[in-house]
Image: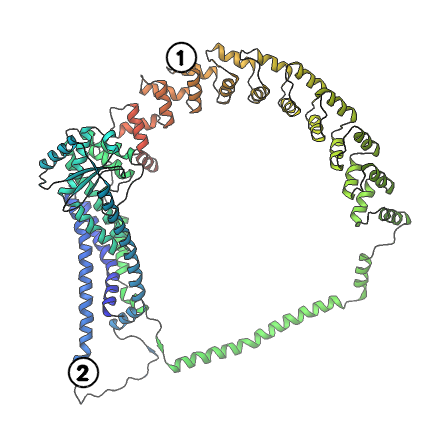
Amino acid sequence: MTHHWEALGWTLIHFCWQAATIALVYKLADLWMGKGRTQARYVLALAALLGMLVASMGTLAYEESVYRQAATMPAAGISGAKPSLQIIPRPLAVIDMPAAPRATAKVLASDVMPYLDFFWLVGVACLSIKTIGGWWLIRRLRHSALQKAPHTLRIGLDRIRLQMGIPRFVDLRLSSRIAGPLTVGVIRPLILLPVTALTSLSPEQLEVVLAHELAHIRRADYFWNILQTMIETLFFFHPAVWWLSHRLREQRELCCDDIAVETCHDPAVYATALLRLEEQRKTHLHLAMALDGNQGRLGLRARVLRILGDAEEQPRDLKPLSLAGMAALLVLFICPLPQVFASFKSAPKVSASILHAVQKTVRTHAAVKAPAIHTSVAAAASTSVHAAKAVLVSPDGATLELNQSATPAPSSNGKSDYIDQMRAAGYNVDLDKYIAMKTQDITPQYAEQMAKATGQRPSVDDLIALKVQDVTPDYIARMRAAGYNGDLHKIIAMKVQDITPEYADAMAKATGEKPNVDELIALKVQDVTPDYMAGMRAAGYNADLHKLIAMKVQDVTPEYADAMAKVGFGKPSVDDLIALKVQGVSPDYAAKLHADGIEASSFHDLISYRIFNVTPEFVAGMKEAGFSNIPAKKLLSLRVQGVTPEYAKSIKAQFPDATVEELEQMRIFNINADFIASAKRHGFTPLTIQKLVKLRISGILDDSDQAKENQQ
């Protein structure tokens, strides 16, 4: 490893405390300055960032000179040596520690510096690729922005340029690939405007936006931003660099805002332009060298409030604990550096005598401990084996007792005959199955009868289920005679529901078709009788079995169907009847809506009104709030959006001329009394509903409200 890489590594290490010191000094100086001195605070931040670069360059030059001096010292020592010089060997020490800090530094350099330099190079390479990608993207934007700006806009740009004292020509182009204004170029500056800005901004707003971009050109911000990006790339590992760089960008945008505000008569024009640009910014291009500000919603809110003369309250004092903490961390980092560097050395050299002594002590200690451990383990093992043998070789009573418990006791001839008979019938199962069959009084004769009735030999579980549900061979024969040759599980299910051949015949006559086993079970479960089916068919509902079952499930009766047919929307279909009944729509509900002026044009409207709770009470509450003669469709839309009479009253109190459409729009964007009060508190007056909607879309008030809640 050459001395150049070692010098670089030490420079990076020293930069950690140097950058922290510069950041701390900058913070104290920035607090000492006032809020209004924006340009001075920008110069201070720029000087601090450049100071970090200068400090690192000075450290690198110093480390290089140290290594050069170290390289020339041995030669000088040899040439100046005297012949009479005697070299007396030092006695062997127990531990041979480094004799000088520079020796420790060399150990650290040889062991750690290669990895440190490697990771630094990887980080610089990655960020350089990102920066080059941003530069390439800017070039593509510059060459693809072929749309020329309107002539009137270019005239306004030249007027503002001359007014600001910029002698160079500034080109203005339009691009559909960006979401906000961009300024690129140092020698040949170019301002890129999004095409949407022409339609979303007024001429006055466009001019003040151009003034902001011209301010960047006059201040040569593009050049300083390139240098800033280089510093971020070189010292990417230090948080203080990123923090200071972020503060520098904030102050840069504020300086340009001040220049832009000076060119317009009304600061609200510029504030509104920023808000509208944010609304159009669906995708934001974060370019490494493009002066788009890279402002989030929090930065935008601060800029708008500052432009309007109502800057947000930010604590300018540094808390004592914070200041003490920063200073303590800095001291803790600087003070132990020599010890830390010395600890990087792999291991001290230990003499053979001390090593031999340690090894002998360890062997002696192990020899002393080993017999005791062996004795304990052997005793434990012997005890365990003895206990096991005691169990195995204990008197025969235990073994005999085990054999007696495992050997079944002699049983009576009756029990032995039952098992033998069931085995002879083909049921060679375990004892639990025999007990279950015996409990249900299943005999070999019953098993034989069920096998003949079903045409197959039932399993033990089938036999038990058949016996439990009292399924007899006669029942199976009768159901099969009625045409239901289902398997055993279907037969058991029909018997559970008490389905008889007579019931099956009656349902076939009532429906005009023979129901299958599943339909029979469903009809019986839902208590669908031939009388119910006849009544529904008499009412004009000659539906299939599934529709009839669904109507019976919802307790749709012929009387209910007849009453709903008299509401005024014709005869409801089966699906309408089911939906009306599910939602609890009754003829009385429809009549009450009609009496209160809520007109419905179909059963679907009645169902929707019921689902979203459009009631006469809701209509009366809206009238009391000042919204009368609301169409039925709009009533439904209001309820869908969750509009309540209380909400309508609060909006009407703020905006007496608010319409139903505006009320619905405000509810969609969740604009309530608290949001309106927040907008007024931040100085957005006079307020209109459209302005509130735009404020909600931009989200610039959300962060301040959240911060207020956290403080409370």
Q: What residue is pinned by disc 1?
A: 629
- Up/down of 368 relative to 200, above or below: below
**Observer-nearest of 57 and 95:** 57
- Up/down of 63 relative to 218, above or below: below
Residue 109 visible in the snapshot: yes
**Discs 2/1, front:** 1
**Observer-nearest of 707 and 173:** 173
Residue 48 position, x and y percent, is 18, 51
Residue 271 position, x and y percent, is 22, 32
Residue at the extreme bottom of the image, as rendered: 84
Query: Is 461 on the left-hand or right-hand side of 75?
Result: right
How many labels sit on residues? 2
Residue 82 position, x and y percent, is 16, 87
In terms of image quadrants, where is residue 507? Answer: top right
Q: Which mark is residue 78?
A: 2
Q: Amino acid at mark 1?
A: Asn
Residue 129 position, x and y percent, is 28, 53
Q: Earlier in the sequence, mark 2 or mark 1?
A: 2
Dot 1 surroundings within 10 Å: few (below 14), some, or many (20 or more)? few
Q: Amino acid at mark 2?
A: Ile
